[in-house]
Amino acid sequence: MKTILVNFGGPRCTEEIEPFLIALLTDRDVVRSSWPQAIHKLFFTWIAKKRAKVIVHDYELIGGKSPIFEDTEALAALLRTKINEEVLTFHRYLPMTHPQFIDEIKALDSSDPIQVFPLFPQFSYTTTGSIARWFGKHLPPKLIGKLHWIKSYPDHSAFTNSFCSIIQACLKKHQMLEEETLLLFSAHGLPKSYVTSGDPYQGECERSFRKIAAAFPKAAHQLCYQSLFGKKEWVRPYTLDCCYSANPSYRNIVVVPLSFTSDHIETLFEIEQRYLPILKNKGIHAVRCPALNLTEEWVDGIVEILLSEETVSYSTLINPLAN
């Protein structure tokens, strides 16, 4: 079976920051408003251009680009060797890559089913749902009908065991005893109104948190949410607040990027530059746990999920409330 790896995408150079943000913030699955489409697009394009000028410095601190594009491409290459099948990639907010993707997917053997694997363990209409809607707008209906979507895998053992191994390796590397450590699980945030209107993301994050935390019974555990945007109330507690209120009696704190399978701006900059210094100023030994990235266990885990997880149709992924 052919496979499509779908991911967020990220700027490959500073010149791509602005178009990346425009594509992200004008996506009505991500940023909702009651405005007509033309006004929504005009306003959030303006916001994106302003924000791009601010965060270019953040990207410069992590090498002038996001590694998420290259890592997704490398992951696809590794999977091709594992399953001996074609693996395509789709980068949602890199519009300059979309024409090539459309050509590649149309060129696939029309008789073969296609499995779609989101690199988002926890389902949200703002991530996997947004990608499904994009496919619906830009791919032929006959092709849409051939897609078999893995909706999510928040507590699938192939995912949680891979993360447990990463955490264990992090504790060992930094010589941290489990019983002296707080594991601060930081997931990407989501507006609270999205959850109350039916987005299952928070519940799926909690499932991941419980499964992984149970593997470290001697440690303390907390779930929180980062990467807030705008003035709306988001799902709490916020990672920033948890860092400010962290008890200095904790000898060690490991910030675990629960919803991120690839390291990028929100781990390499936001966690490293905004959260860890707050904890270190309290005298706490604080470190960032890497995301899954390209570890062999995670590559094998993806294969296991592809073979074992039930799939859903395109229509089940579309948010009926988004306009």
Image: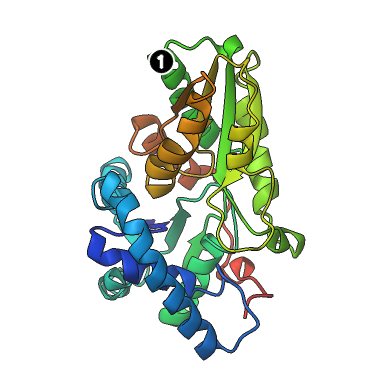
Considering depth in this image, is 68 or 147 the residue closer to the camera? 68
Q: Is any atom of residue 112 visible in this view?
A: no
Which coloring applies here? rainbow
Q: Quadrant of the N terminus?
A: bottom left
Mark count: 1
Considering depth in this image, is 17 or 107 the residue closer to the camera? 17
Residue 86 is drawn in which quadrant? bottom left
- Identity, as a three-letter code, of the amino acid under mark 1: His
Q: Residue furthest front?
A: 281
- Check the image and report above or below for 282 versus 152: above
Q: Residue at x 45, y 68 (%)?
A: 24
Taking the image as shown, residue 219 lies to the left or right of residue 280, namely right
Q: Residue at x 65, y 26 (%)?
A: 221
Considering depth in this image, is 112 or 171 the residue closer to the camera? 171
Taking the image as shown, residue 313 lies to the left or right of residue 42, namely right
Tag 1 residue: 174
Residue 246 placed where, x, y %? 63, 27
Q: Residue at x 31, y 74 (%)?
A: 102
- Check the image and report above or below for 220 versus 32: above
Taking the image as shown, residue 275 lies to the left or right of residue 232, namely left
Q: Quadrant of the C terminus?
A: bottom right
Residue 147 placed where, x, y %? 47, 66
Residue 286 placed where, x, y %? 48, 24
User: Under tag 1, what secondary structure?
Assistant: loop
Considering depth in this image, is 230 or 151 the residue closer to the camera? 230
Mark 1 burial class by Cα count in 10 Å: few <14, some 14-19, many 20+: few
- Check the image and report above or below for 96 versus 149: below
Q: Is any atom of residue 314 visible in this view?
A: yes
Q: Residue at x 59, y 61 (%)?
A: 312
Residue 233 placed where, x, y %? 69, 58
Taking the image as shown, residue 315 lies to the left or right of residue 165, namely right
Residue 247 is drawn in which quadrant? top right
